[in-house]
Image: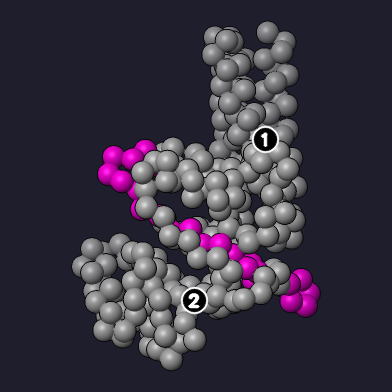
Amino acid sequence: MVLYVVYRAPVESTHRSTLPNRLKALGCQQLHRAFWKVDEKRARRVLKVLENNQPIFLKRLREIKNPQLARKKEFTGFGSLVLVMFKLPKGANREKVKNFLRRAPCIRLRRSVYAFYQKHRFYDKEQKLVDALKFVNFIRALGGEVKIISRVVIVNRESAKRLLQETREHVEKEVVKIVGSCKELYMKARDGNDLVLLRDRFSRIRRRFSTLKKVAAFYEGWLKVDFSKKIMRAYHALRKVNSVIQQK
């Protein structure tokens, strides 16, 4: 059986070149930077090579698999995924990609490799969220190269748990940023700064919150992760700023 493996590249540049050479020596085929096709018979040897680089093993299935919750609601898997690997042209606006991904409820496997839920019916009817197809079209519009692999599942359970935790932290960091921006606006509004500029910035923060709320709701439906307390924290921060701006 064919497996896929993706890993986090080491910080040291010398090790970055060593790992590909060792994987090639094992007969692995490089598909995209740190994403490789692996013969299942060599999986243990590959794991040994990549043990310090957070390797994630994946495999393709014919059927669509649902997310998995073991007994006591312990998370064990994301279900079937669509992998999108991309390479941007030189000079491309990476910040633009980062902002676009704010609307994408996906799993970051590594830089330039993202996993989207296979079941498209989970996406909002208004089509404000970004699914795999939208992301692919966006990267291509920037002149980037894209590779797609559908109907894949993560094989190693511990990697799935780690990625779930990273996804939680990503949403929580976005909440912290919104709350921090609200605190800054609140102080400026209270001190009598230019309200026209503050209201414009507040509108942008409010749109960012609206997007985060939709993404968090998607994760809740997909992965049964409850972000309601975090979202309410951002909501109250927005209300506090709004009350000051409206009084001026």
Tell me what residue is drawn at x 59 percent, y 50 percent: 131
Residues drawn in magenta: 69-94
Q: Is residue 26 left or right of residue 102?
A: left
Tell me what residue is drawn at x 72 percent, y 48 percent: 217
Q: Residue 230: in sight, yes or no?
A: no
Q: Which of marks 2 and 1 is nearer the N terminus?
A: 2
Residue 187 part of the magenta segment: no
Residue 130 screen position, x and y as percent: 59, 46
Q: What element carries label 2?
A: strand
Q: How far apart are marks 2 and 1 (CA)?
A: 34 Å
Residue 81 screen position, x and y as percent: 59, 65
Looking at the image, which is closer to me, 83 or 168?
83
Q: What element carries label 1?
A: helix
Label 1: how many Cα within 10 Å (few below 14, some 14–19, many 20+)? some
Q: Residue 37: in sight, yes or no?
A: yes
Looking at the image, which is closer to me, 8 or 61?
61
Q: Name the residue under label 2.
A: 57
Structure colour scheme: one colour
Extreme-bottom residue of the structure: 41
Q: Which mark is residue 60?
A: none
Q: Name the residue under label 1.
A: 210
Amino acid carrying mark 1 in the image: Ser
